[in-house]
Image: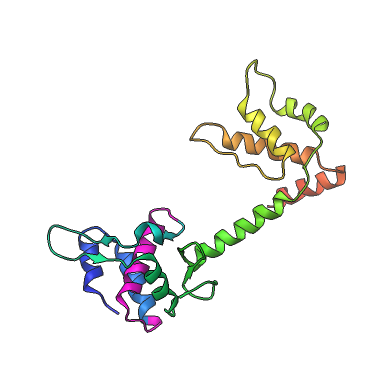
Amino acid sequence: MKSSRLRHAVHTGHLRELDRYLAESLCEIHQCDDELILVTTALLNGAAGEGHVCLELNQWAGKAVFVTTEFDNSYTLPELESWCEQLQNSALVSTSRDTPLVLDATHRLYLSRYYDFEQRIGTSIRNRLVNDALADSKKIMPILNKYFPAAGKLDRQKLAAAIAMLRPLTIISGGPGTGKTRTVSRLLAMYQELSDTPSRRSTIHSRRCRR
């Protein structure tokens, strides 16, 4: 299904050529001639291109898109309830990963691969959170001081490593140059040194050497 509206939206910078092409291709493959589905798919891929994992429909519902002063190419999206209903009636959309687009219960629309990624990450995090602490606090202090010698002030990298050793899930973040890589590399060395047995440490080391 070719859309002059989407082509104009690309021309005016509202969409990328990739967004238009994906929307038209999916609608053609699934024999869908609904302009709402076409526009929604293009917007969703555009959002992904901007780093968003999904399109939150409640933030877009009822709004006009592709607005320009050059010519009338705008398209007004339906209200949320009507929009979701029309999406659910499309062959492109379902609540599972079996279709190109996935609509969840909170009115968030995903490209199926991103929905799959999010579900896997969520499952992994939940599994980690039910685990016990990874190490005894008394056991980690000597090795923590070995890899992060006292500097006379609060060492946030050392603190991050200590928390990571004690908790089943830790997120280490920071801007460029804040020491994330240094912290994680030393954290991995600590894990290796604290392995249960010497033979296990030897196995880990030999595997890394082969890689």
Quadrant of the rendered image containing residue 22: bottom left
**Picture layout, residue 112 above or below residue 67:** below
Report the residue at 27% width, 77% height from top: 2
- Along the line of sight, which residue is nearer the eye, 182 or 36? 36
Left or right, residue 195 beside residue 18: right
Whole-percent x, y for residue 18 in the image: 33, 65
Left or right, residue 49 beside residue 73: right
Q: Residue furthest left?
A: 70
Left or right, residue 42 beside residue 141: left
Residue 50 is inside the magenta segment: yes
Magenta part of the protein: which range? Answer: 29-52
For the stretch drawn in magenta, the main secondary structure is helix
Q: How many marks?
A: 0
Whole-percent x, y for residue 66 in the image: 24, 61
Whole-percent x, y for residue 14 in the image: 26, 59
**Picture layout, residue 174 above or below residue 155:** below
Quadrant of the rendered image containing residue 155: top right
Report the residue at 65% width, 18% height from top: 151
Residue 97 is inside the magenta segment: no
Report the residue at 40% width, 61% height from top: 57
Report the residue at 69% width, 26% height from top: 148
- Along the line of sight, which residue is nearer the eye, 59 or 176? 59
